[in-house]
Amino acid sequence: METLELLKPETSQSVDFLPLNGTDYIELYVSNARQAAHYFQTAFGFQPLAYAGLETGLRDRESYVVVQDKIRMVLTSPLHSKTEMGRHIDQHGDGVRVVALWVDDATQAFAETTSRGARPFMEPTREEDQNGYVVRSGIHTYGDTVHVFVERNAYGGPFLPGYKAWNPHYQPTPVGLRYVDHMVGNVGWNEMNTWTRFYGEVMGFSQLVSFDDKDISTDYTALMSKVMSNGNGRIKFPINEPAEGKKKSQIEEYINFYEGAGVQHIAVATDNIVETVTALRDRGVEFLRVPDAYYDDLKDRVGQIDEEIETLRPLGILVDRDEEGYLLQIFTKPVTPRPTLFFEIIQRKGARSFGKGNFKALFEAIEREQELRGTL
């Protein structure tokens, strides 16, 4: 059971210089945006929201925006060869390029972060159409990942200027996903402290909790992780790096196949994980499975919970408890051809932690998948 400590970085100020309202959108660069959008609609219950491409005047790319409650995902593909977007896909495969953060003042957010050492990605830019205007700016973070600050309080359109509403006949029902709980980044050897320092000094985040290779290890593999959180706790970014083990860890596998640092998984919250996971499984989403014996002493480990163990067992849902309550979680298999990006489904019942009690069982399940892939 991990202890959560809020450790303010030495350089941070008592005033939050980078107030963040939440995750605005997550943009993936993918080889086929139309098919990816169909997949996330069909399998994950996302709804069509907006479209940009040739029909809206774009000549270089096509984007489909899907939404479920507060989660917005943008699936983007290039329309020509030899583009920067195409290079990203060629190097990394399908993966997260943009983690966009909702702010009240994108110009100020850019000034605060770049003055503290962030490398600029996008100068503050006003974008407008008949629905109003949006201001966006951006900075680089680990690997080829970027943060875009989105100021949208003067905009009433479906998504952003340049997009039109997308309202096709095919609209599968949602599965109960509500918001982004956290997003995990994998970085290379000895880079974790560099990037946690970046989030502390450049963005004013605090270290919420840390794990070392004694916490996160199996007989074969190990990793280290620190969780960084913004001032109001709405944005949480765990950062992982490999640690020495007998065989290749999941972080090394990710780095090798993604060919660099990047977003490893997106954790999305639900209010009823049993219903959500049942719906996802019925739609073809595949999950990592822990041995059935995991459930034999579950109540002894986590105490009384509202759910029946025999309801959780066939679905493979994991449970962990901290000082403030408990959580339920489960992890999909990779949703891309390369063993890189996956999703976590999480329901919190008071717990603010990240499931440390499940790490060993979870990572052994990942190792079984690695063994099947021949990458352990």
Image (cartoon, grey):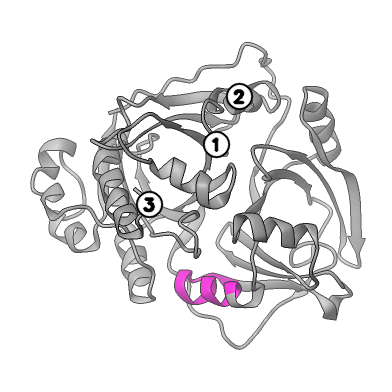
Of the image marks 1 and 2, the number of the one nearer the N terminus: 1
* Rendered location of residue 237, percent (x, y): 54, 37
Residue where numbered disc 1 is placed: 187
Residue where numbered disc 3 is placed: 375
Q: Residue at x 72, y 30 (%)?
A: 18
Q: Amino acid at mark 3?
A: Thr
Q: Are marks 1 and 2 in contact (CB under 8 Å)?
A: yes
* Rendered location of residue 307, percent (x, y): 20, 53
For discs 3 and 2, the disc positioned in front in the rendered view: 3
Q: Amino acid at mark 1?
A: Val
Q: Left or right of 307: which side holds 72?
A: right
- The residues tagged by marks 3 and 2 sit, at their Cα atoms, a distance apart of 27 Å
Q: Residue at x 13, y 50 (%)?
A: 295
- The residues tagged by marks 1 and 3 sit, at their Cα atoms, a distance apart of 18 Å
Please, what is the dominant secondary structure of the magenta stretch?
helix
Crowding at mark 1 (Cα within 10 Å: few <14, some 14-19, many 20+): many
Q: Which residues fall within the magenta stretch? A: 36-47
| Residue 323 visible, this orientation | yes
Q: Nearer the viewer, residue 10 or 28?
A: 28
Numbered tag placed on residue 194 in the rendering: 2
In the rendered image, residue 117 lying in the magenta stretch gets the answer no
Q: Nearer the viewer, residue 151 or 251?
A: 251
Tell me the quadrant of the picture where the N terminus can be found: top left
Q: Secondary structure at mark 3?
A: loop
